[in-house]
Amino acid sequence: MDAEWLLREAGVKLCAVGIGNGMQEARWLLAQASGRPSGALRPGWEVSGEVCSAFAGLLERRCRGEPLQYILGSAEFYGLELMVGPGVLIPRPETERLVEAALEAYGGSSSPVCDLCTGSGAVALALAHAWRGRVAVFATDISATALGYARGNARRLGLAVSFFEGDLFAPLPAALRFALVTANPPYVSPAAYAVLPSEVRDHEPREALLADEDGLAMVRRLAEEAPDRLAPGGAVVCEISSEQGPRAGALFEAAGYRDVRVLRDYTERDRIVAARWPGAAAPAGTCGSSPISLERPRLPVRTPVCVADATGRRRQDPAGPDSRVQAVSETMSNAEGGRVSSRDYVQELVGIMGRLRGEGGCPWDREQTHASLKRYLIEEAGELLDAIDDGDDAGMVDELGDLLLQLVFHCQIAGEEGRFDFQDAARSECEKMIRRHPHVFGDRRAPHAEAVIDQWEVIKREEKGGRGDPSAVDGVPRSLPALHRAQKMLHKAGRSGFEWPDLGAVLEKVHEELAEVQAALAAGDPQTVREELGDLLLAVVNVCRWRRIEAEDALQQAVRKFESRFRRLEAMLAAEGKAMDRCTPGELLARWRVAAAGAAESAGAGR
């Protein structure tokens, strides 16, 4: 059965039961069933009966409301791939804000850190990864099942976290005092729990979500019990529901904490309460004398990989991980240095766009489509090129941001239609870059740029099952500027063997085309003149290609030179009190030569 047809039918079925991202989820499920990365599900691939059967089973589970992460056996959190399954809460993107707040709040001392209600270990493991063994991390949970996943995740990721089973601080050694306590406790009130999606209520552990009374019962306990386990100046960072901010902050203030703050997530909703117990503490953002890295790890470029049991052991790895890509990702994850920020502005921009397009958002943004945004994509790219040509760094930052907004905009629209989102686009590009650079991320060799290009073309053909494009000049976008498109097409034709023997022959073709233009002009046929001028332009572009000059850049430079000289000519005539349309051709030519000489002098002085 054809994979594309199968995915299309599955996507429709998922959307029919209310799953908005149906097409993308169908791809993940088929990747799981087939053992292929989702990026390898190419058009025309014939799916075997065995894979169809496995896929149908996974699809049925998803249609019944079972969480996708449980079916795939894994979930991404703060750049880490965590095993999850029935009996453990699925890590949410909003909890990543808890990690960021914790990294910012840590005072930096010899005291350890504790994560309460750890579940899959998401927060504890993200902190352990960020500190790379420089801080002792402890974690507790009342669920043995959840701790089975947490311990398995720690082993698989090679991270040192000490897990204890029990209620809040109770199972921890009494002598321990912590510089930081984090918690993602149950905080959903009974009323809010009753209206949660059935996918959550029917599948995820009730005890990890539901709290008594107003949902703050566990937060109250944390505020009351933490002072006995905090080192002087230690901090508490706790996740809360979006409507609990003022009340949660008041609980910590009443308990005697200082610096109580309610922090918002990227959608501007209250999400975290942070507070510090009185006493001296080291400056935030340090770990003893060693700075903390706030860089989130990079995920291995692959689809969700495992179906795990409650002990944290893998039962299978259907995605068949590419060990080379995995090793590359681990190397990237362990690299240190460079400018690092705890604030993920890309994710924030995605959140802003979601709000602009959502209920109560911006009317103009909500009306836009892929087609209506095309002009802005071209305009922003043009403005970026101007900033590059001007050497304007501030302008480049501004225009790159505008161009990034357009990319996020298109992904947001596609995500609303259940086709793909920004993460899908970024993931696809990561996979492609690693796959097409085996001389960097693998063991192949490419000693020079031409070898890289040759290798790139070979890999592209391999990705298409060895078929390649039907024509050597396929893959040149029709919407490119004409000079750029012409040069790219001539380059592709030349690489296929359709090439002039030397530059002399290319120049001879220019003279030939010029003669044909002159003949067409003499004949007076406008259509023929148009065709011959086009042939002449194409021949000139070929000269640029042979000399490795970008025709588009060359013409842009010529236009800028003309503009400068013309403005100088206008200034000269204005100084003389003359109008351009009143000058004779001879007068204009004489002054043009002066303007050109002046422009050349200015250029020389600039050098």
Image: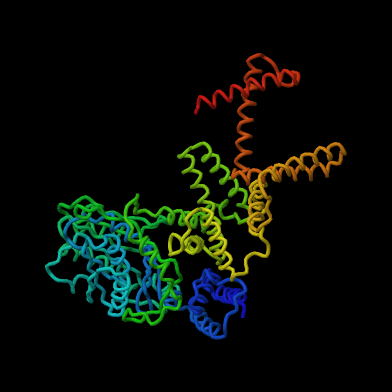
Farthest residue, direction right? 523
Q: Position of residue 264 (x, y in %)?
A: 36, 56
Asked whether 506 or 568 is in front, the reply is 506
Q: Where is residue 172 in the image (x, y as percent from the top left)?
A: 17, 71
Asked whether 396 or 367 is in front, the reply is 396
Q: Is residue 224 left or right of residue 488?
A: left
Farthest residue, direction top? 576
Residue 198 showing in the rendered view = no
Q: Is residue 351 left or right of residue 258?
A: right
Q: How many marks?
A: 0
Q: Position of residue 400 (x, y in %)?
A: 49, 47
Q: In which quarter of the image is residue 456?
A: bottom right
Where 397 sits versus 198, above or below?
above
Which residue corresponds to the image point at 53% horizontal and 61% vertical from the top-left? 455
Farthest residue, direction left? 175
Q: Where is residue 547 in the image (x, y as percent from the top left)?
A: 61, 43
Q: Quadrant of residue 534?
A: top right
Where 525 sits versus 306, above or below?
above
Asked whether 253 or 35 is in front, the reply is 35
Which residue corresponds to the image point at 34% horizontal and 56% vertical from the top-left? 295
Which residue corresponds to the image point at 48% horizontal and 47% vertical from the top-left? 401
Q: In this view, does 81 lie to the left or right of 365?
A: left
Which residue corresponds to the image point at 23% horizontal and 76% vertical from the top-left? 165
Q: Tell me the quadrant of the picture where the N terminus can be found.
A: bottom right
Residue 130 showing in the rendered view = yes
Which color mode does the image show?
A: rainbow
Where 169 sits versus 345, above or below?
below
Q: Quadrant of residue 70?
A: bottom left
